[in-house]
Image: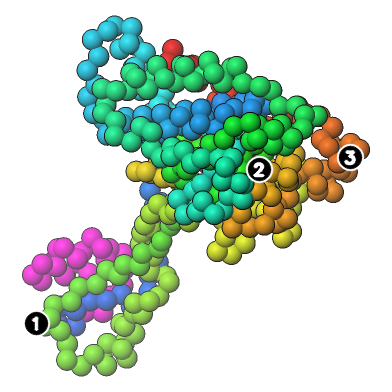
Amino acid sequence: MKVGKLKKRKNSGLLYPYFKNKSFRLNRYIFIKPIKSVKLNYKKKKMNLTHEICILNCSEKLIDYKLAFQLQNILHHSKIIMKNKNEVQISNHLELKKFKNFKENMEKYDFCFILQHTPCYTLGSVANCSDILLDKENYYIEELGDIYNNLYSNEIIHLMNKCETIQDKINQSDIYNENTNYFNNFLKHCRQRKIPIYRVNRGGKATYHGPGQLVLYFIFNLKNYPSNYNERIINKHYKYTNKENFPSKTSEYEKNNIYTNSNSKENISSIERTFDLRTTINNFQKIGMETLQKFNIKTHCKKDTIGIFYKDKKIISIGLKITKYISMHGLSLNFNLDNNFLKYLLSCGMNHNDYISMHEINEMKKKNYIYQKGKIASSSNILNELTLNITESLKKVFNVKVRNIKDIREMFY
């Protein structure tokens, strides 16, 4: 019977569009299935999530950890405030103009800071004080947590002004010098006064930051990047069944090849995309691996462990905090790290001998980056190349454009 005759049946008009130009067998009961499994055409819904990443390159600067933490904390909470779209009451004309520029840039850009730190130790959310192996007389614990945790939208001007103050202090920071013995200077400082050990709001255990280690901080709205999503194929089958008129002898339909397998992979109809945290972490790991690959350094990840390894030794550590899909903290890459600093802590529960730095790897020596006594020949050259490689890796992994800035105050004007 032709499909057109279905119009005379009750409710058959609802079925007709789905079965146009298809072949059917029609019984006196209204029970219709395709003769064969039919691959349904579908279109992928494009994810119009365009975003740009602003890179603040301070790779040669030794920036105090607390100062850098304040900066990323300010931008992290500003993004959350902007995301909530709360109204901000500003009467001053100049402040209003500055706020509008800031708001526009916060919505348009995500941020990546590239820098080094003065020597310090930090404790993550699952770290214990016992992870620090310094004498207790030489340090104290300072809780940083969420410095700007309970902010209201009207306090955004305070954050903007704070940003400008922080930038002034960044400009005054020392420049990294590969010939300086930072470890001896650190020990002298510890004997003279107690040093702060910072407990922060990132995941992970205790870790060290200091000269010879490049740190990347990511203030990202993670939902803006399609590469952070997983795709799941959903199978749907267009069929109509009326329980009252359901045929009692289903074998007749089986004989006539009416039955279709509900698990058939051919019946594809739609794709579901969901944000996936594991995929997101893997993307940050890819950035590190892609960066080192450009130096012909082959690295890998370990199962059930976050971080990047060269052979059996860790070269990149990763720790993040994510609130309402806005990230902060990031990764640290050892390029000329003094291993003596690692003797004073159980870094992420690992021994100091379980870590490696780029200057210890043969591939770097072949490129003449290393001169006698195993030191970096020119930190400026390697830092410039690292920064360039990181930029290219960010563009590749997240499929975005990047903008390089030298001053965070560019966001206000």
* Rendered image: mark on residue 373: 3
- Disc 2 or 3, which lies upstream in sequence? 2
Which residue is at the front of the view, 356 or 237? 356
- Provide residue 12's location: percent of width, then percent of height: 14, 67
Q: Give the SS element for disc 2.
A: strand
Q: Which residue is mark 1?
A: 244
Q: Where does the magenta region start and end?
A: 1-26
Reply above or below: 31 against 351: below
Q: Residue at x 38, y 48 (%)?
A: 45
Q: Which residue is mark 2?
A: 333
Which residue is at the front of the view, 394 or 297? 297
Q: How many residues crowd mark 2 within 10 Å: few (<14), some (14–19), many (20+)?
A: many
Mark pair 2, 3: CA separation? 21 Å
- Disc 3 or 1, which lies upstream in sequence? 1
- Provide residue 325's location: percent of width, then percent of height: 38, 44
Q: Give the SS element for disc 1.
A: helix
Reply above or below: 33 against 180: below
Report if residue 299 is visible in the image: no
Amino acid identity at mark 3: Lys
Amino acid identity at mark 1: Glu
Q: Residue at x 37, y 13 (%)?
A: 98
